[in-house]
């Protein structure tokens, strides 16, 4: 007796898939807007300090180094967009493959959709660079290199999206690779540094700046850049296709007294985070590796910076290899704390609503969430300072530790806010942009002897002044800055409290005036029909 397959498989063309994927992506207008806004803001602000930073750290420097900002921005935005493009639709894609759609066609559609989003970011980055510089010596080269940056990081985002299920882990990996690639790339470091040669955009950055490396061999800098691009795309293609063929399910986790509610809420939050062992490993490894790499790659020489000593602003000279690791620590602390705070808030949103419905008092719920964020900030800070202590001796250990804790706590709360306001993709882009511009660029005494007005308005101003005073001097002179940092913490906590009330408030639908609810109409009809 023969069996008949009654299932119906409708052939789906690649063009139709791409159109549907693009329509799905276009529904989130906030994310699409940030794909343009983040590159414009980053290139417009960061471009002006690239020359000074490159010369300071022994990199290529010069106006040509400024062109790399377009590639960096396009690359990061493409990686984040592609990660969530692959990760968020994982279950649906696996069902399509099980229903008969060829995995190669599905991967091609996903990569094409991600490429379209990357082109938006690359175009915004390139046009902003052209407007800022006022004209490029090699416009075609810079445009091609910007697109190649986006393609390499597009492949990286797809690769991580296929292998890393948890969004906070995947985002931290993308952020870590990007930070290391940028900070230790040829724009900031000598081109012949051994560690920088293994980074994916080493040769691409040199070709983009029109600075021959001298160690590329026969393929040349452009040849190696093309090889990196092709290998990245091929590797991500194979991994995404292979992981799409097998359906896997990933588990998702979603006392009457105030003291008891607080204890229960905090315990639940910490238990949820403790299950993510990869996150704990990343929170320890990422800041540690970042500080260690900065210690090993800092060029020898003296650097003069403006500091406050005994109530006066003076110019002091420091041996740069001994000072630089301590100044790099807050950058990794702030960026990682923002990402962790963002996903902690997003992951607990549904649970918070259920707890509120179950009778949790808002104050207990808010306090428990703030305690969880504080624990995460403490872990990130401890991991960074443990490695920093091996390479750096601050002038005042107590204020230095306090300043790092203030930075971590501040940006963890910033991450909570941007997560609730912008969602996952948009929140990651803002969480990347803000601490990098604030801590690495605007607050840096190496790049800005005289702080701009923008630097005074950013969240890291007060804590950064405390940190640099503690790191570089032997007496504490930043009491006012400490009060500013505490004021930022209080303001951010108040904003989190206000938004938490909106997040946990259940949505209620009110019937329109003049019309009875359908349920009431049905009950009335039933009662009238009874004898």
Image: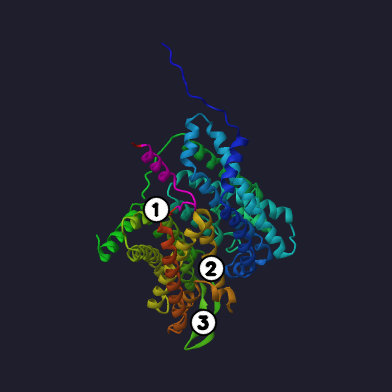
Question: How far apart are labels 2 and 1 at the CA level?
Answer: 34 Å
The residue that label 3 is drawn on is 307
2 vs 1, front mark: 1
Left or right of 268? Residue 520 is: right
Residue located 56% across and 72% down the image: 442
Say which quadrant the N terminus sits in.
Answer: top left
- The region drawn magenta spans 509-529
Secondary element at image label 2: helix
Query: 10 Å neighbourhood of mark 1: few (<14), some, or many (≥20)?
Result: some
The residue that label 1 is drawn on is 350
The reply to whether residue 313 is in sight is: yes
Secondary element at image label 1: helix
Left or right of 34? Residue 395 is: left
The reply to whether residue 224 is in sight is: no
- Check contact, mark 2 vs mark 3: CB within 8 A: no
Question: How far apart are labels 2 and 3 at the CA level?
Answer: 17 Å
The residue that label 2 is drawn on is 440
Question: How far apart are labels 3 and 1 at the CA level?
Answer: 47 Å
């Amino acid at each position: 007796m023969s069996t008949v397959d009654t299932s119906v498989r409708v052939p789906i063309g690649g063009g139709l898939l791409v159109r549907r994927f693009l329509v799905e992506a276009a529904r989130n207008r906030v994310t699409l807007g940030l794909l343009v806004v983040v590159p414009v803001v980053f290139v417009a602000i960061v471009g002006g300090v690239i020359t000074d930073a490159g010369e300071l750290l022994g990199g290529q420097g010069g106006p040509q180094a400024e062109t790399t900002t377009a590639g960096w921005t396009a690359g990061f935005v493409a990686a984040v967009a592609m990660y969530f493009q692959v990760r968020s639709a994982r279950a649906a894609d696996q069902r399509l493959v099980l229903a008969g759609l060829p995995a190669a066609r599905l991967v091609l559609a996903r990569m094409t959709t991600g490429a379209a989003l990357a082109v938006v970011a690359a175009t915004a980055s390139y046009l902003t660079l052209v407007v800022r510089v006022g004209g490029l010596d090699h416009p075609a080269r810079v445009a091609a290199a910007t697109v190649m940056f986006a393609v390499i990081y597009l492949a990286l985002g797809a690769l991580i999206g296929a292998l890393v299920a948890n969004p906070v882990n995947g985002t931290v990996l993308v952020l870590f690779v990007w930070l290391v690639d940028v900070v230790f790339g040829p724009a900031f470091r000598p081109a012949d540094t051994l560690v920088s040669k293994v980074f994916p955009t080493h040769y691409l950055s040199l070709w983009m700046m029109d600075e021959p490396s001298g160690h590329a061999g026969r393929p040349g800098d452009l040849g190696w850049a093309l090889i990196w691009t092709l290998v990245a795309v091929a590797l991500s293609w194979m991994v995404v296709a292979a992981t799409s063929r097998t359906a896997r399910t990933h588990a998702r986790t979603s006392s009457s007294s105030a003291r008891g509610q607080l204890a229960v809420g905090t315990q639940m939050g910490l238990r949820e985070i403790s299950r993510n062992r990869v996150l704990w490993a990343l929170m320890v490894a990422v800041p540690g590796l970042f500080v260690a790499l900065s210690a090993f790659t800092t060029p020898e020489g003296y650097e003069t910076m403006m500091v406050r000593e005994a109530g006066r602003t003076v110019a002091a000279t420091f041996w740069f290899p001994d000072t630089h690791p301590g100044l790099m620590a807050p950058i990794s602390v702030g960026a990682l704390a923002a990402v962790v705070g963002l996903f902690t808030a997003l992951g607990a949103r549904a649970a918070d609503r259920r707890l509120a419905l179950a009778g949790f008092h808002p104050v207990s719920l808010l306090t428990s969430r703030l305690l969880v964020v504080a624990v995460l900030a403490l872990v990130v800070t401890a991991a960074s300072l443990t490695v920093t202590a091996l390479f750096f001796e601050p002038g005042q250990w107590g204020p230095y530790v306090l300043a790092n804790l203030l930075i971590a706590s501040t940006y963890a709360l910033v991450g909570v806010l941007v997560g609730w306001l912008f969602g996952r993709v948009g929140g990651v882009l803002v969480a990347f942009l803000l601490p990098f511009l604030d801590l690495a660029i605007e607050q840096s005494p190496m790049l800005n002897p005289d702080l701009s007005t923008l630097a005074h308005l950013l969240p890291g101003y007060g804590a950064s002044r405390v940190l640099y005073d503690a790191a570089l001097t032997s007496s504490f002179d930043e009491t006012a800055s400490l009060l500013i940092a505490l004021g930022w913490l209080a303001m951010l906590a108040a904003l989190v409290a206000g938004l938490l009330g909106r997040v946990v408030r259940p949505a209620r639908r009110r019937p329109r005036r003049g019309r009875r609810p359908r349920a009431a109409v049905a009950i009335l009809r039933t009662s009238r029909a009874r004898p």
